[in-house]
Image (cartoon, helix red, strand yellow):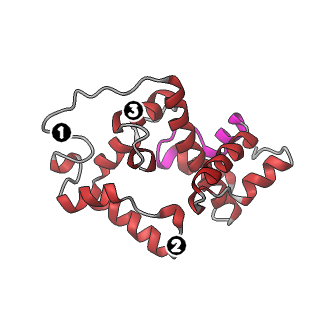
């Protein structure tokens, strides 16, 4: 949402980066439209409040506006995409931009998975299994971090934190520790 809200890329470009570079079955905007903004926005608000307004989970005004307008996604015919008049917008196929989008989203997801492990929510195996079987990700996030390189994940997160100075980009302690010690999750 932040990438879109900041005008870095279009909905189509973000969805393209995640499906074509990352191998996700759906891009995030297609997925939110499929779930419905009535459900997705309320869940986002609930998570934000349940975690005592943790900045990482702050809801998006763009999604709030869709919800308030009744543009609930596929079920109402309009959301991020207009299902009554399919868009002819094509994604921007700039490999550098697409990689930036993909990494920014993936590393935020990896960071959340690392935090779940750090806070002992579940084992690394269970976290990755939940991502594979529960939400149909192409890979488990912790295994993906190992493949990409944990130090690279930390570097990108630190760069985002330095750019924005927002807690939403703070690196998970376990991710940073593994990078310092040159360890992997598996």
134 relative to 103 in the view: left or right: left
Q: Secondary structure at mark 1?
A: loop
First reached walking from the N terminus: tag 1 or tag 2 = 2
**Numbered label attached to residue 26:** none
Name the residue that disc number 2 marks.
Answer: 51
Residue density around tag 2, few if under 14, some if 14–19, many if 20 or more, within 10 Å: few
Q: Secondary structure at mark 3?
A: helix
Question: What residue is pinned by disc 1?
Answer: 83
Percent across and percent down for residue 22 are: 52, 32
Which quadrant does the C terminus fall into? top right
Q: Which residues are magenta?
A: 133-148
What distance separates the C-alpha of mark 1 from that of mark 3?
18 Å
Q: Is residue 38 magenta?
A: no
Q: Is residue 114 left or right of residue 79?
A: right
Rendered view: 44 above or below 129: below
Q: Residue 66 in the image: state x and y as whole percent.
A: 24, 55
How would you rate the neighbour count of disc 1 (Cα within 10 Å): few for under 14, some for 14-19, many for 20 or more? some
For discs 1 and 3, the disc positioned in front in the rendered view? 3
Circle number at residue 13: 3
Occupied quadrant, residue 103: top right
Does residue 185 appear in this view? yes
Secondary structure of residue under mark 2: loop
Query: Looking at the image, is mark 2 or mark 3 earlier in the sequence?
Result: 3
């Amino acid at each position: 949402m932040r990438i879109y809200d900041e005008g870095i890329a279009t909905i189509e470009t973000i969805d393209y980066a995640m499906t074509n570079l990352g191998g996700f079955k759906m891009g995030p905007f297609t997925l939110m439209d499929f779930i419905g903004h009535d459900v997705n926005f309320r869940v986002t608000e609930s998570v934000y409040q349940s975690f005592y307004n943790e900045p990482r989970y702050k809801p998006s005004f763009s999604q709030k506006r869709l919800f308030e307008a009744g543009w609930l996604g596929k079920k109402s015919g309009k959301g991020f995409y207009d299902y009554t008049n399919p868009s002819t917008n094509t994604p921007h196929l700039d490999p550098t931009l697409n990689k930036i989008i993909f990494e920014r989203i993936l590393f935020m997801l990896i960071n959340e998975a690392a935090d779940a492990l750090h806070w002992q929510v579940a084992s690394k195996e269970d976290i990755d299994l939940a991502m594979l079987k529960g939400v149909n990700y192409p890979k488990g996030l912790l295994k993906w971090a190992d493949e990409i390189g944990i130090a690279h994940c930390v570097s990108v997160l630190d760069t985002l934190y330095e750019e924005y100075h927002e807690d939403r980009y703070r690196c998970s302690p376990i991710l940073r520790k593994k990078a310092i010690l040159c360890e992997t999750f598996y």
